[in-house]
Amino acid sequence: MKPIYVLTWLLCAIFYFYQYAVRSAPGVMQSELTVAWGGNHIGGIISAYYVAYALMALVAGQLLDRYGAHRTIPYGIALVAVGCIIFAQGSEPAGAIGFVLQAIGAIFAFIGSSYVAARYLPARMLAIFVGFTQCLGMAGAAFGSKPVHMAIDPLGGFHMQWQRVWLIFAGLGFVLALATWLIMPREQGDSPEHHAPLSTQALLAPFKIVFGNPQSWLAGIIGGLLFVPTTIGALVWATSFLHNGEHMSMSSAASDASMVPIGWVIGCPLLGYISDKLGRRKPVLIGGGLLILASGLAAIYVPVGTLPRYSVALVMGIASGAAMIPFSMIKEANPAGVKGTAAGVMNFLVFLTTGLISPFISRLMLPSQDQPLSLEGFQHAFVPLVVGVVVAIILSFVIRETGLAQTKKILLAVPAVTA
């Protein structure tokens, strides 16, 4: 395990931290954006982000397979920074365009780190590195929630305009892009067949392999349904739910909501380690799904004061580390030569799920007569997220085990061939 490859993975993981901070920032700027845009249109902007993110995931996997990390990832970082500058212009069209550009660049963060981990780092540690990547991503989400709220809070000590936050994000992005471009090894793509002249057949061949595998679909759907309680529930609506539904102060609501991504920071490497140690994926996936369900129900329906909200959110975040297990499973269920495409397909399915569910949840969140949504209204709107977790748990019993222990068992069962 060469240090340069570990550093390369770390740069990609830092990129993931950065883009998650950028992605989660609008969730705590809803009041400011409503004033600037003449209405709360955050649901539509979030949906556009995830649809663009999902579609770009397919292209990003192909580009990584064909051109390698050095010729793709630094430019993805720079594009996120450009999107931040456009978002800072202040108008709703600029916000939409900037956020979509951020999505297009951001997709290279997780897919890139997964690509580097799968290609250069030990296979026995794949789930651990994937878990640590998501760990840093969710640390970024927490950074984009509480600290950003503190920066723009008119009652706080910083009194920063929300546009300035985006300009700071842009500056950090350009610095990271330059560092990544200078340090990342200059190597070609993953497999020789990806360097043949471009043709429709060459472009579609990896997708036929991955999409033709039913295990890919199961992994993507399970991952997507386990992700939405965080991507939609925690990062977009949890602060409003706690502030308007349970009448907490805005500062306390932002703090408690940020415990979900902090829980991910713990859960991703922990559950990845347990899965690798067991050599099995399904027990950790199912157990995590059940804990997400239990903590989610407690967060939504248990009366205020019965349980500390921050502890419920933390447990939910830790359990949500199980959502990363299918990211390892889809790569293990497909040939090595298409692992970049497999990572892209996984992200496509996961975040397309978020993009499709987000406008539906946003519609349920619309209050009547311009009044804040009641607690009962929030509880009703969160029902689809609960149902999604139940479906994910059921499908987790169906998906094939891909862990190392199962692979060794299959190999031992195959009779040796002698010359």
Image (cartoon, rainbow, N blue to C red):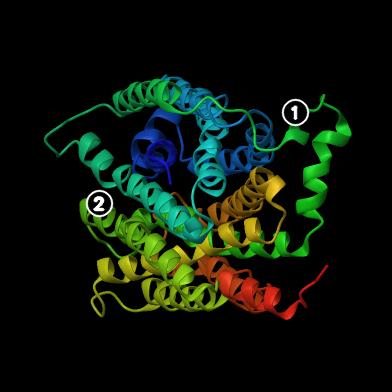
Image mark for residue 195: 1
Query: Residue 151 appears at what percent x and percent y?
Result: 22, 35
Of marks 1 and 2, the one in the foreground: 1
Placement of 372 over or under 68, stated as above or below: below
> Which residue is outermost to the left?
157
Q: Nearer the viewer, residue 194 or 375?
A: 194
Q: Is residue 403 visible?
A: yes
Relative horizontal placement of residue 263, taking residue 340 as reference (left or right): left
Query: Residue 218 appears at what percent x and percent y?
Result: 69, 65
Quadrant housing residue 194: top right
> Which residue is outermost to the front?
419
1 or 2: tag closer to the N-terminus: 1
Quadrant housing residue 59: top right
Q: What SS does tag 1 mark?
A: helix
Crowd class of label 2 (few under 14; some 14 to 19; many from 20; radius 10 Å)? some
Quadrant holding the C terminus = bottom right
* Amino acid residing under circle 1: His
Q: Nearer the viewer, residue 48 or 405?
A: 405
Relative horizontal placement of residue 329, taking residue 39 as reference (left or right): right
Residue under the image location 35 percent in, 44 percent down: 140
C-beta proximity under 8 Å, tags 1 and 2: no
Relative horizontal placement of residue 380, taking residue 2 as reference (left or right): right
Relative horizontal placement of residue 304, taking residue 98 as reference (left or right): left
Image mark for residue 411: none
Residue under the image location 24 percent in, 72 percent down: 308
Query: Residue 133 appears at what percent x and percent y?
Result: 42, 49
User: Label 2, on which residue?
Assistant: 250
Q: Nearer the viewer, residue 276 or 365?
A: 276
* Amino acid residing under circle 2: Met
Residue under the image location 60 percent in, 71 percent down: 392
